[in-house]
Image (cartoon, rainbow, N blue to C red):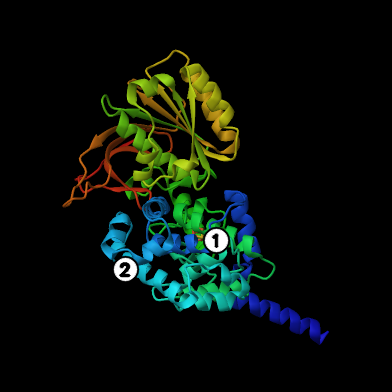
Amino acid sequence: MIDIVLSLFLTVLVQAIFPFRQAIDLGSIRERLAAHFGHIQIDERPDPVSQFVGSFIGSRTYDWKSWDAFMLLVRRYPNWDSIADAHVTDIESTLEGVTYSEKKAPELKRALCAIRDSFGRIDLDFLAKYDVDQALNCLEKIHGVSPKIASATLNFSTLRMRTFVVDTHVLRVLQRFGFVGMKADIKTTYDAVMAAADGLGSDDLFELHWHIKSLGQTICTLAKAMCVSCPLSDICQRGVENVKILKAFGDKLGIQEKSIRTPIGHGEVDLCLKGGLQHGVLHEVFASVGHETAATGFVAGLANRVTTGKYSLWIRQDFSTREFGELSPAGLLELGLDPAHMLLLSVSNASDGLRAANDALSCSALGAVVIEIPGSPKTLDLTASRRLTLAAAQKSVTAFLLRLTAQPDASAAETRWLVRAAASQTQNDDWGRPTFEASLIRNRSGNTGHWFMEWDCDERIFQSSTADHGALVSAIAN
Ligand code: SF4
């Protein structure tokens, strides 16, 4: 009896001290993220030296930029020895565009020379004979090699060793989650993950890293934690608090519905949208005449906000391509968007596009469906917009109707925007951020308004533009 009372007491005590006991359960984090982002299976891995070099040049740089730089490097130099022997300025010019290329170039050369001097040649396959700690130790002894580079070399490459990569995204998410303290560093976080990773193999840790990183890039970003859209919100320390605060805020504003909303980032706009862009409904974006490209970029940004790591489908008529040009993957990359997460469907007319959109909206693997329709075809009437609204509600996939060279007419859309390009704030050689003059001319849930907004390509959110000298917000809810 005393044992039972004691054990109950200890359970209550443990729960009181660690109200988020689940925080140490990596398994549930993993399962939730896999359900949200889907499992990752990569059969082909790079050899250890390629991964080492890729990780070396990749820190604090977009994945696609560092990949481009890596490809330039391997095209320019026939082997690793020739990079080790190259002049630093040549390496630096090849790494142009990579953050801190001026520091990375000499350090990469030095690291490759150190591998050659220590092990006779630039080859890291021998690490397979070591245990993980020995291998990490061996790599971290090389000047400029961080624990992150060392772990990535061992886990991401063909070595497939059982270790975990903690980068800045992973660190931020695990800190906010409460898995480690807010002041924890990469080493402490690595130790905490490995201590709780019983039962997780090398590939599990590989997938866990990429899932947490994706969460950090799309939902738990540096600028904002979008807890309402987060699959961890009910087991995350900060998420539980944030959702409680948002709920209280929603109650104050009289929002009864349980709709999911993702903030677009611009404070005033999010206030008008009662917390953010609603998922599972139809949003319309009209391009001002001659501003079709700006409206396209604006929709791409909005769609990215609600997809949170899922795919989006962009349905275009062939006519759009002839009239307004192709959707450019390079342009999407410049906006900080991943073209690999966007599927493109070409259709010959508006009826086919609407039919495809209604089908696609029932696919929960998609986060957003963009239907680009030029002109005002008869098939796009109030009934068609109601069909899209109903289809979007089924699986909470968000529909965006991009209207080019068209006038607003009757529709069941939740919001309607009118968009034109605005001048970016340039500084020195920097072209500045893409800037939009956007009018929210219909909002079924709140006020309308007119703002200048910048798209932050790093954080992938809209922000207030310095061109905005006071937003005009109407008092009338549509
Ligand atoms: S619930 Fe919020 S704070 Fe927690 S991981 Fe998700 S977005 Fe980040």
* 387 with respect to 66 (left or right): right
Q: Residue at x 48, y 15 (%)?
A: 379
Could you say whether the residue bearing mark 1 is in a helix, strand or loop?
helix
Residue 196 or 112: which is nearer the viewer? Answer: 112
Q: Residues within 10 Å of mark 1 (few under 14, many from 20)?
A: many
Q: CA distance from mark 1 to mark 2?
A: 24 Å
Which residue position holds label 1?
156
Quadrant hosting residue 97: bottom left
Residue 278 visible in the displayed image: no
Residue 304 on image: x %, y %: 44, 43
Quadrant hosting residue 17: bottom right
Quick check: 98 above or below 151? above
Could you say whether the residue bearing mark 2 is in a helix, strand or loop?
helix
Query: As drawn, which residue projects farthest toward the top?
Result: 378
Quarter of the image with the C terminus is top left
Q: Residue at x 57, y 77 (%)?
A: 133
Residue 104 visible in the displayed image: yes
Under mark 1, the amino acid is Phe
Residue 98 or 174: which is nearer the viewer? Answer: 98
Total numbered circles: 2
* 337 with respect to 343 (left or right): left
Q: Are marks 1 and 2 in contact (CB under 8 Å)?
A: no
Residue 214 on image: x %, y %: 50, 54
Which residue position holds label 2?
106
Under mark 2, the amino acid is Pro
First in sequence, mark 1 or 2: give its number.
2
Q: Residue at x 32, y 55 (%)?
A: 94
Quarter of the image with the N terminus is bottom right
Which mark identifies residue 102? none
Query: As drawn, which residue projects farthest toward the left?
Result: 428
Q: Residues within 10 Å of mark 2 (few under 14, many from 20)?
A: some
Residue 138 on image: x %, y %: 51, 77
